[in-house]
Amino acid sequence: MIVRIMGEGQVKLADSHFTELNKLDDELLEEVESGDEDGFRRTLAALLDAVRRLGTPLPDDALEPSELILPAPDSSLADVREMLSDDGLIPG
């Protein structure tokens, strides 16, 4: 699976990591919905760190279609609210 982190680039991840990332996505969605700014910051950082840790960065000139798009690390809670659909950032 190819994941794009806005403002950073693309990362290739094995599908086996989907469960771990989906758990973080669910937590992030709950924090966005409840307006928990501190929790949102912590969970967004954890989600992005997991993608970076578990994945392999693609070259900047790679033009692979991204299956998932994650917000930039400095995104606000309001920014992420705009990005979300009922499915969260990672479709379940």
Image (cartoon, rainbow, N blue to C red):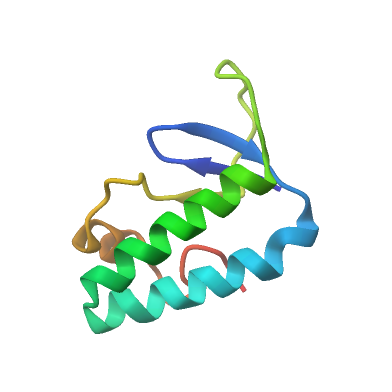
Picture layout, residue 92 above or below residue 54: below
Give the quadrant of residue 22. Answer: bottom right
Give the quadrant of residue 72. Answer: top left
Relative image position of residue 66 (x, y in whole percent): 59, 42
Kindly identify the residue that appears in the image at 24 percent across and 77 percent down.
36
Kindly identify the residue that appears in the image at 61 percent across and 49 percent down.
67
Give the quadrant of residue 83. Answer: bottom left
In the picture, measured across the screen, residue 48 lies left or right of residue 10, that is left
Q: Nearer the viewer, residue 87 or 9?
A: 9
Kindly identify the residue that appears in the image at 62 percent across and 20 percent down.
59
Kindly identify the residue that appears in the image at 58 percent across and 15 percent down.
61
In the picture, measured across the screen, residue 91 lies left or right of residue 84, that is right
In the picture, measured across the screen, residue 50 lies left or right of residue 81, that is right
Q: Nearer the viewer, residue 36 or 90?
A: 36
Residue placed furthest toward the top = 61
Picture layout, residue 86 above or below residue 81: below
Picture layout, residue 50 above or below residue 20: above
Relative image position of residue 45 (x, y in whole percent): 41, 55
Relative image position of residue 55 (x, y in whole percent): 68, 42
Q: Considering the image in quadrants, where does the C terminus appear? A: bottom right
